[in-house]
Amino acid sequence: MTNQLKEYILKGQFEKAKVSTKELSYSELDAELMDIAFNDSSIANYSYIMSLLVEKENVELHEMAFRLMVNPLSYLDGAYYAALYHARRCVELTDRQEVGYLSNLLFLHMIPNQVVSEEEAYETAKRMLSLEPNHIQAKQFLNKQYIR
């Protein structure tokens, strides 16, 4: 399927792409899109996910968009800021109850470009520990804060 899907996406034929992927699970769709984006890092890959989000917003699609922007499309100007939007939407859509989505915010603070502020990262780490008291990444972040 990847070759046909790739052709549809890269040519902007999103309706055909949607028809060809409608039977896929989110994890299968994610795998297909990641494969396409790693092999052809066109912005059309991101546009396709955005077209899906316009039709039906959900956390799974925001997570896919986040992953596209921090992995195969991270070299694009503004990619981490686009990823930040999707990370925040995941957190909002899960009512700040999912540690995995919160950790995406902490990740965006720890990258060299630091698109998440110190204050937001601190609040995020505290929230992560309230949900999962032994979360290593959150503990390490907060320990570094006290050392400074």
Image (cartoon, rainbow, N blue to C red):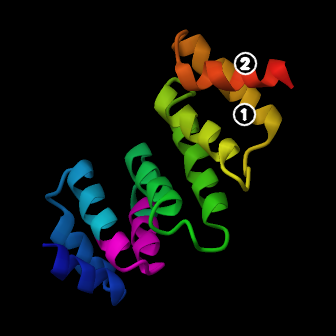
Alpha-carbon distance for marks 2 and 1?
13 Å
Q: Residue 143: percent from the left, percent from the top?
A: 72, 18
* Disc 2 and disc 1 in contact, CB within 8 angstroms: no
- Near mark 2 (Cα within 10 A), the count class, few <14, some 14-19 or many ≥20, is few
Could you tell me which quadrant the N terminus lies in? Answer: bottom left
Give the vertical position of 101 relative to 16 (above or below). Answer: above
Of mark 2 and mark 1, the one earlier in the sequence is: 1
Give the vertical position of 4 relative to 132 (above or below). Answer: below
Q: Which residue has dot 1 on it? A: 121
Residue numbers of the magenta segment: 36-53
Most prominent secondary structure in the magenta stretch? helix
Q: Residue 146: percent from the left, percent from the top?
A: 82, 18
Which residue is drawn at the image coordinates 73% and 45% (left, top)?
A: 116
Comparing labels 2 and 1, the label whose residue is closer to the camera? 2
Q: Nearer the viewer, residue 76 or 47?
A: 76
Q: Secondary structure at mark 1?
A: helix
Q: Which residue has dot 2 on it? A: 143
Residue furthest toward the right? 148
So how many labels did they put on this image?
A: 2
116 to the left or right of 6 = right
Could you tell me which quadrant the C terminus lies in? Answer: top right
Disc 2 marks which amino acid? Asn
Which residue is drawn at the image coordinates 42% and 47% (left, top)?
A: 58
Disc 1 marks which amino acid? Ala
